[in-house]
Image (cartoon, rainbow, N blue to C red):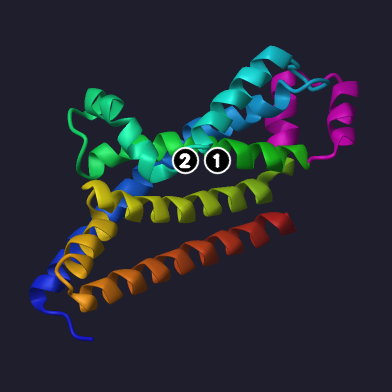
Amino acid sequence: MFLSAQQLHMLKDASLQTLYMVSVTTVLTVLVGIPLGILLVVTRKGHVLANVWVNRVLGFVVNATRSVPFPIFIVFVIPLTRFVVGTSIGPTAVIVPLTLAAFVFMARLTESCLLEVPHGVIEAAQSMGASRLRIVFRVLLPEALPGLVMAMTITVVTLIGYSAMAGAVGGGGLGDLAIRYGYHRYQTDIMWATVILLVLVVQLVQSVGDSLVRKFSRR
C-alpha cells in the first residue's frame, strides 16, 4: 500500500483533527465526569453526603444520556451544538456531543472505582475526625487512583471510536476521511491507512494507561 503525497497530507490533517477533538474532549470529560462520579458515590445512602433524591436525579440523567446511541445523540444535540459553537459540523462542533456522551460514561466508571474502596477505610477516617472533603480527597481518590487511571484510559479509547463515528455526520477527523474517500470514492488504500492508524493510536493509549496503572498500583 503506497499513498500519494496528497493522500499523506489529507491523512496528516485528519489525524490532527482527531487529536484535537479527543484531547479537548478528554480534558472536559475529566473535569466534569470525575466530580459527577464522586457525587454519585457520596450521595448514596449511608455515605458521607447521603442524599437519596440527589443521587436518584443524577443517576437518571446519567442513565438517560448513556442509553442513546452516539450517532443518534449527535443529531439529537445539534440545536445545542449550534447554540454553543455556532455550527453543527466540523471538529469543534463535534466536541459538544463528544463531551456530553463521554462525561456520563466517565462518571459511571468513576463511581465503580470509588465503590471498590473498602468502607472500613472510610469509617476509620471518620473515627479520626476527618472532614467530608478530606475523606473524598485524602481517602477515596488516592485509594481508587489505579482504577481511575484505567477508567480514563478506557474513556480515551472510547472517545477515539466516537470521534471516528462523528465523521459520518461531517465531524472531520479520520472517520470523515475514511468515509468520504475510503468508502464513497472506493479508495481502499485510504481506508486501510485510517484503520491501521486508529489501531496504532488505540494500542499506544492502552499501553500508556496500563503502564500508569502498574506504577500507581505499586505505590
| Label 1 secondary element | helix
User: Which image quadrant: the N terminus?
Assistant: bottom left
Image location of residue 134, percent across then percent down: 72, 25
Residue at 83% x, 21% y is 46
Q: Is residue 161 left or right of residue 146?
A: left
Dot 2 falls on a residue whose secondary structure is: helix
Instruction: Inspect the image, locate mark 2, and give the three-letter code of the amino acid beneath it.
Output: Ala
Specify whether residue 83 is in view: yes
**Residue 97's quadrant in the figure?**
top left
**Residue 106 image label:** 1
Name which quarter of the figure residue 78 lies in.
top left
Residue at 20 percent of width and 40 percent of height = 89
- The residue under label 1 is which amino acid type? Met
Q: Position of residue 38 (x, y in %)?
A: 64, 29
**Stretch of the chain drawn in magenta:** 117-141
Side of 82 where 126 appears, left or right: right
Question: Is residue 119 toward the left or the right of residue 56 in the image?
Answer: right
